[in-house]
Structure formats: structure tokens, C-alpha cells
Image (tube, coloured by chain):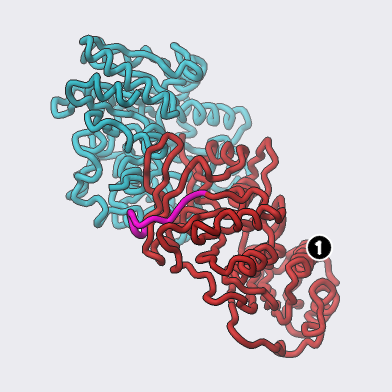
Amino acid sequence: MLDRMEAELESDLRFMEVCGTHTVAIFQSGLRSLLPKKIVHLSGPGCPVCVTHESEVNAFLDLAANERVIMATFGDLMRVPGDNGRNLKKAVADGARVKVVYSPFDTLKLAKENPDDIVVFIGVGFETTAPTIAATMKMARQQGIKNLRVLCFHKTVPLALDALLSDEAINVDGFILPGHVSAIIGTDPYNFIAEKYNKSAVVTGFEPLDILQSLNQMIDWRKKGEAHVVNNYTRIVGENGNPKAVEIMYEVFEPTDALWRGIGLIPGSGLEIRSEWEEFDAKKEFGITIEDCAPLKGCKCGDILKGIKQPDECPLFGKPCTPANPVGPCMVSTEGSCAAYYKYKLD
Amino acid sequence: MSDKVLLDYGSGGRASQRLISQLFLGHLGNDELNRLNDAAELSMSGRLAMSTDSFTVDPIFFPGGNIGSLAVHGTVNDVAMMGAIPKYLTCGYIIEEGLPMDDLEKIVEAMGEAARHAGVSVVTGDTKVVPKGAVDKIFINTTGIGDIIVDPAPSGDAARPGDAVLISGTLGDHGLTILGTREGLEFEANVQSDSAALNHLLVKLVQELPEVHVMRDPTRGGLATTLNEITTSSNVCCELQENDIPVRPEVKGGCSILGLDPLYLANEGKFLCILPEEHAEKALEIMRADPLGQDACRIGTMTDANPGKVVLVTQLGGKRLLGMLEGEQLPRIC
């Protein structure tokens, strides 16, 4: 199949995956080392940790130092660097109470066990995680839990892709669309990729063969001058996604403008807690506002998340930015593209 | 005795004496320990292997063992990896006041059983009880010493290009069990720690095949970290075949849900054996004849291609680095 793909290609096919799990799958399976040179693999803004803005990271690190607060978080955020070399691991060593949870529902128990404290869950993630967090808030209300808050930094994927495609500096022929996010939102929200920008995009599973199949289709379509948005991951993703999850998500959250690390403000691409649910809103409770700030000098996270540069083209990559001393979250998140390059790339 | 460990039990007074005579000597006692001198009197000569390890595992009880059996297995295995017959152990306890006496008894009983099975004697020990919160339930340090029976002893810097890389069984069982138990995660399938003393098998192996270059147990950091240590020390490259690496389906499944890689999870009853290619079949035969090595298999070869690196040939036939982790593995968002 790889030989056939190489033979079919008249020029480079630049494809972007928009999901950290795909980034890791492509490297971990060794697929990247097998792809023909003409297939250029770019990692997009699909790792929720990586697109969490510097100001958002600093906000949760500040809040972790609050003695009234027990922070609850998914494990990925523990090593994400804030300003002055801060991170949650170091905060714990300084006495902060931070609990790694496997599901947002774990925070209900944590809140019940610590009635005199405020449990704050760091809501970082895309459409994949937002519905579960919304369901957790609904359950907390049903159970009369008063000391649970959510620090909501959720972002939504389609508008980020729209922002990327409207940037002329970005040169992408097609997208491998995220399997997990699509399981929630379905495929309709991506139709603009073909209709407005004449590019192909395929919702894809995480096995190497899934990815190869999608690449193969995109090569065929390009040869014929066609662009399609297609769902290849039908064993998990329904055409309409999971309407119930979407309903719960929008019952609790509403769209808002969001700052993406390395990309900047994308109108309407974030989620915030609706006023009807403000008793859970950590931003309101602690007066947290997120302001844009200048990116760190030399850090090319933005160009990497947009597929303009490869991680090893960043002057900081490997020195001084390493998993031991990460300058940006892309080097520290399990699903970050810089981390994947550093961890898996042979040459 | 009280139903909980009190500060008095570490005081050196009567309470301490009762704890030692009734509990520790009851399960660990032998001629040397029973003398209760300030130090053990041992007669040893020649080349000795010595190792120490502190055990702080949380939870202290887990499917497949407890902190007591683990404290014996861990140190016995470290000594035996040097091609040595482990003989004596020391044992230091730091206990948090309030630990249920029943728990302590279960731990010491497991240590006694593990030591008898491994054929080692605990010859000296120490107990401290510290105020609540100063440690988490119980920490145990063990030091082991044994007679090296091969020359040269297997060593991490002795791997050579062309050597076969063998593993004694499935990977990740202990690490996933501990993580799962700690977080209260229930796995549908039965996953349990592989904690075991490997010394009888290791001794048999080096007696029959003194040509073994390296023996190492892939404990913390798992197979990937251990192999990286070896390739760095020996300045060789290890080429691993992903298809050949044994991982139980239930461990693979648990890891996939939690976003963990079984190749980085700790093992407490497995070892890597690196030796010249021509002896690989014989080594596998010896390993497979022992229940602790029944799943032994060859997983790779040492080469001179990328010195200091571990390269994984994936199921797809691609190649990628299998590097060292920066710290512990953390579960992911999605």
C-alpha cells in the first residue's frame, strides 16, 4: 500500500492530524518511519494540553497555591510549565493540594470527603471531555454538593481548524480528523473544510491501518481534484456524533472567545459556564480573567501547532527545551508533538 | 500487645522487646537473629554482591503480595542479578504510629515466608515508630549480601553487539496492579503483581551458562528504562521486536485505558538476560523449565547501529526510539 501511495504521488502531500492520540499513534506504531518522503506529516492543534494558553496555566498554578483549594486535574497537566519554571508538581512540593483524577466524577467524592475545602477541577480539553464535566456538575447539583468548582478552559475543535485554514501561511493538503472529538460532534461541523477551503478531511481511527486508509483516500481525491469530508471511523463515530452528550455540554456551557497557545484569540472557540450554573464557576468565585500575553522568546509552539514548522525546527528543541526542562507544554504532554519527536524520532 | 503500633514500640523499652520477641522473631527468627546482638556475626569470603533498597509502596497490600514480601524479593533479586547466591538480609522498619498490629503481622509473616522460600536469613534489623504523618503507614529497608559464583559477574556494561536479549516473562503486571489498586480502579480481568524471588532460577542459569553478559530486573521504569541504562553503560544499541515482547492482554487493555505504556511499568518478578547469541536457546530452555520463567522469550538483539539507544521495530515494521521517561507516567486527558 505504501509503495502504491508513493507511486501515485506526483508532489508532496502535506497532511495534518488534529488529535494528540493520532500524533502518538503515528510515531508509536513506527508508521512515520515508513511513510514515503513525499507524505509530509504535520501535527496540528489537537493536544488539549498544548493549546492551553500561558495565562490559563498561570491561572491554575496561582489557584493551586490558595490554601482553601484542593485542585483536581487529569495527570497531563502536572508538569505543564507556567512562568518562572512553576508547575503543579512543584506546587505540591510547596504544600499545594493537587489530586490527579481519572474521571471528573472522582471530584464528587473528593468534594464530599473535604466539605470544608473548595475542590476545583481544571477543565482542560475539547468536546471529548466537556460533556463528562457538564454531567459531573449536573450530578453535583442533584447531590447538593456545594464545594465543587470548575475552572473552565475548554476549547472546541472546528473553529480552530477554520482559523488555521484561513491563515495563508499554512500549507496543508488534508486533515486526519480527531476520532474522539468526532464521536461527540459527528462530521457535519467539519463540512466547511471541503466546501469553503476545498481540502479533504477524514475522521480516522487510531490503528495504523486506519491512518493509511485515510491517507490513501486523500491521495486519490487530490489526483481527481476532489475534496471530501468523510467518516472512516464508523465503528465508533456516528454521522451525528452523540447528540445527548452535545445537549448536556451546551446545557451547562456556552461558546465564548478563547485564547489558544501559539495561535491567539479564536472567536467563539471556547466554552464557558452558563450563568445558570455559575455556582460551579471557579473563574467567577476567584475573580480569574485570562489576558493575552507575549509568547516566550524563541518558543515556536505557535508555528508547530499550525504545522508551519516541525518541532525539531524550533531553536529551543532538545536544548534547552527537553522533557526535563520543558519550555512549552508540547514538550511535556504525553500527546504533544515536540514530546513525540523527542521521544520517538530516530534520526 | 496493643491492636495498633504505638510510639512505645519503637522506644527500646519493654514494649519494643515484646514486639521483637513476639512478632519479629516469631516470623523471621533464626540462630543469628535470635541472639539479638548489636550486629550479626557472619562468616563469608571471596567476591560478594551487596545491595540495598527501601520500599515505600502504596498500597502496602496489593493483589499478588504486600510490602513485606516485596522488600525481600526486591533485594534478593538485586543480589542474584550479579550472579550471586543471596545469603543474608538486614531489615529496617519505619512504622507510622497507629498502624494496625494485624497489618504489621501480615507484613512480617510475608517477609518470613519470602525469605524462607528464597533461602536467605534475616540476620539483623531495626524498628522505629514515628508520629502519625511522619511516614505513610510503613517503610521497609532491606540490605542483602551473597556469594558471587561466576567470574566475571554479569554487569550492565558487558553487553556486546550480536548478543541476544531475553526476557523471563510478561511485562507491566506489577506496575499496573499497584496503580490500579492505589486509585481504586477495578479491572474486569485479574491483574496481579508478579513479585517473586528469582534467585534459584538465576543461580541455575549462571551455573549452566557462565557466559551470560548482563542480568537485570526491569523494576522501576520498566523494560524501556532498564534497557536504556544497559545500552548506555555498554555503548551498544538494542533493537527490540515489538511483536515478541510479552504483555498480557489484560495489562495491555488497562494501560490503553489509562494512557500508560507497559514497557515503562515496574516488574518485580522478571529479569532480562543478555548473552552471546549461541547460548540463547539453552538459556531459554533453562528459564522455561522454571515456573517463574515459563513465558521466557527472545525480544531483541544488541547491535552497533545507534550506540546508547534502544530502537523498537514496531509491529508494522517501522522503527522508533524507545527512550527513557523523564519522571513517572501520568494518565492522560483523552
Can residue A307 be seen here? The reply is yes
Magenta stretch, residue numbers? B299-308
Disc 1 secondary structure class: helix
Q: Which subunit holds the residue at mark 1? A: B
Residue at the spot 50% in from the left edge and 70% down from the top edge: B155
Colour-to-chain, cyan: A
Residue at the spot 70% in from the left edge and 41% down from the top edge: B190
Q: Where is residue B305 in the image (x, y as percent from the top left)?
A: 33, 54
Does B303 appear in magenta?
Answer: yes
Location of residue A35 with respect to B185 vertically, above or below? above
The quarter of the picture where residue A16 lies is top left
Does A205 appear in magenta?
Answer: no
Residue type indicated by callout 1: Asp
Residue labelled with disc 1: B102
Residue at the spot 49% in from the left edge and 33% down from the top edge: A279
Which residue extends farthest left?
A: A168
Q: B183 or B173, which is in the foreground?
A: B173
Q: Position of residue A141 (x, y in %)?
A: 57, 29
Q: Is residue A89 left or right of residue B105?
A: left
Residue at the spot 55% in from the left edge and 41% down from the top edge: B255
Task: Count numbered badges in the picture.
Answer: 1
